[in-house]
Every structure is written in structure tokens, then in C-alpha cells.
Amino acid sequence: MQLLHFFIVLLAIPAALVSAAVPSSKRFDLTKPSFDLFRNKKLKDATVQQSFTFDNTNRRLFVAQRRNGASTTSGDLTITQLDFNGNIKGHMYLKGFGHGVSIAAQPVGSTTYLWTEVDANSNGYGTKLARFKFSSGTTLSKTSSSLTKFAPISGATEYTAAIDPINSRLLVRYHKSGAKHFALYDLGAATKGNFSKPLASFAHPKGLKTKSSTFQGYAPYGRYLYLLYGDSYEAAPKGELNSELVTVDMNTGKVVQGPTLTKAGSTLKFREPEGLAVYRTAAGQTRLFMGFASGNSGDRRSNLFYKNATIS
Ligand SMILES: *[C@@H]1O[C@H](CO)[C@@H](O)[C@H](O)[C@H]1NC(C)=O
Ligand SMILES: *[C@@H]1O[C@H](CO)[C@@H](O)[C@H](O)[C@H]1NC(C)=O
């Protein structure tokens, strides 16, 4: 066994070097305060939001939630387009896609393409990635010819994706061999179906001492990945506030800050942490956005907050 371990270590070294290719960048300071974008906004449907993403070029916001009346395993999603005051600008229905753990918006001229999970399994999680044009008022089934599907990792069984809109990279999170992993790609290459050269490739960090084990979202920006954990007040033990952020260096797969408690929107009713995304304002301020679902069952609302202080 010892000899076997020795060879595994030797084999692991070149792989680790190859995957450490993400240029250095600033990172957000998780200990600094959060600010409101909006609170208690209605989405197209009344279920809790699951995730959100920005088309940073066309300055659009998209929020994913399970479709009203759909079962937890159907994979039926509603995508609502909002403006930055939280007004509904459009929506789309997706049938048989997945849970909506994370979605990514890709600007192409004045059009937005979305990357989502698709082909939900019996647990309601997507088994591939799909890329398609956001087209308000339409419904797409998982078999629609307007979808381009991707299964970038050999042997992976579930996929989601998030975007680094500042550096045009796509971060793919996938399930393989009983665990979650991440792989970071150039967005242009990924769009062509070229997943041959990940900039980084690492396991979802294990042994995080988060108060809650409920994973709620992720967002890459430059060299760093941000993770969100936590439960609603209803689901948390003793109704405590347990939402936390963690920063991971994608070149090493190691935690560099956190878990750090975030009290953003602490007075919200229900307050389930749901989604992370990065956005840069027209004035050049880069923000790490955190989403929360609020309100009553049957009338859940969307809330977005952001951190903007960085550590160089
Ligand atoms: C695939 O993308 C990588 C960058 O991610 C690039 O270096 C390589 O040339 C591309 N391969 C093809 C066949 O386009
Ligand atoms: C962060 O945003 C707040 C509120 O919009 C603003 O007052 C503050 O100056 C910003 N800080 C940085 C570092 O951009």
C-alpha cells in the first residue's frame, strides 16, 4: 500500500502544476460590509430563487427558480429577467433541465446566451450543460434543437456552471466518483465545445468548518472562487443565522479566507442564501453579489446584496 501511495503522489505532482494557470488577481474581503441592491422583489414564479447571473455587457440580470407547481425532481425551471431595481423585464420556461444550482449568462453582441444544467436525473439535477439564447416569453424543452449540450468531463454525472464575466471564463462544477469538482475554462473555447485545456481543475474543498453543510452557490472572479453556504431561518438549527462565504484559490484548490459569516439582509423573513455572482458596474466597481430568498411560502421574493472591498 505504501508503494502505491508513493506512485500516486508522484503522478499527482505534474497534474497539480498543469492546473495552476490562473493569473493573479484581486480578491474580495469577506469581512467587509455588504450593501443592498434590492429587497423583496417578485419573480415570475413564487418559489424560492435558486441562483442568478449577470450579462455584464448588456447589463441584464437573470434569476432561476423551480417552476410553480413543478415537482422537485422535474427539472422544470423559470428564468426571470430583472432590471437592477428588481422589475421584471421578461421570463423563460425550461422543461426537464435541473435544479438551478447555478446559471451563467454570456453576452454575444446584444444577445444573452444562458448556460444551465439540462437533462435532469431522477433527483432533479442536470446531467449535462446546455447553452441557448435567452428569448423572453418562450418555453424550451430539454430536447429542443435550439440547445447546444456539453458534457465536458469524461465520467461526470451532474453539471452546473458559473461565469467570471470580467475575465470571460466559465467555471464548471461537476459530480464524479462520489465527489464534487471544479474546472475553469476560457469561455470562448468552451463555447466551441473545446474543454481540452482547463486553466484550473480542483476538488470542491473538503472539511470546511461551515456552520451549515447546505451549499448554496459559487462564483469565480480572477484567481479566486467564492462559495456560499447556509440555511433559511426555518431550516437552521434554533433558527440561527448561518450564512457563510468561503474564498478558494483556484490555483491550489485551498481556502484562503473563511468561512466568514455574512449578516446581509439579516432582518429578512425566511432568508435562505441562494446564489452568488460577480458583476462590474459601468463605473468600474467590481461586486460579489449574494442572493437570498425571503417571504412566505407561496410568495417568495428575491433579494440581492453585494460586497465590493478587495484585498490586493
Ligand atoms: C482549445 O482551447 C485552448 C484554450 O483553452 C487552446 O489553447 C487550444 O488551441 C484550443 N484547441 C482547439 C482545437 O481550438
Ligand atoms: C462599495 O459600495 C458602497 C455602496 O454602493 C460605496 O459607498 C463604497 O464606496 C463602495 N466601496 C468600494 C471599495 O468600491
Image (cartoon, rainbow, N blue to C red):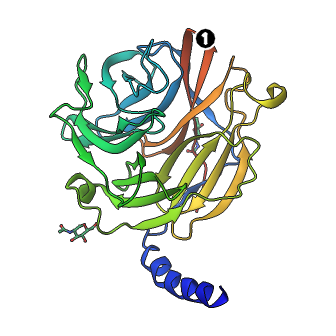
Relative side of 58 to 84, left or right = left
Q: Indicate the position of residue 299 as horizontal and vertical percent values.
A: 55, 9
Query: Toward which corner of the image does residue 138 lie, by quadrant?
Result: top left
| SS of the residue under disc 1 | loop
The image shows residue 246 at horizontal and vertical percentages of 65, 51
- Residue at the image point whose x is 43% and y is 27% from the top: 63
Residue at horizontal 71 percent and vertical 55 percent from the top? 208
Up/down of 178 relative to 32, above or below:
below
Q: In terms of image quarters, where does ligand 2 lie? A: top right
Picture layout, residue 49 above or below residue 207: above
- Report the side of 238 relative to 26 (left or right): right
Which residue, as the protein is rendered here, is positioned at the far front? 1
Residue 56 appears in the figure: no
Instruction: Indicate yes or no: mark 1 CB to ligand 2 under 8 Å.
Output: no
Residue 133, horizontal then vertical, whole percent: 22, 34
Q: Residue furthest left?
A: 145
Task: Check disc 1 and report the residue beneath it.
Answer: 297
Question: In the displayed structure, does residue 100 sit left or right of residue 271?
Answer: left
Image location of residue 282, percent across then percent down? 38, 40
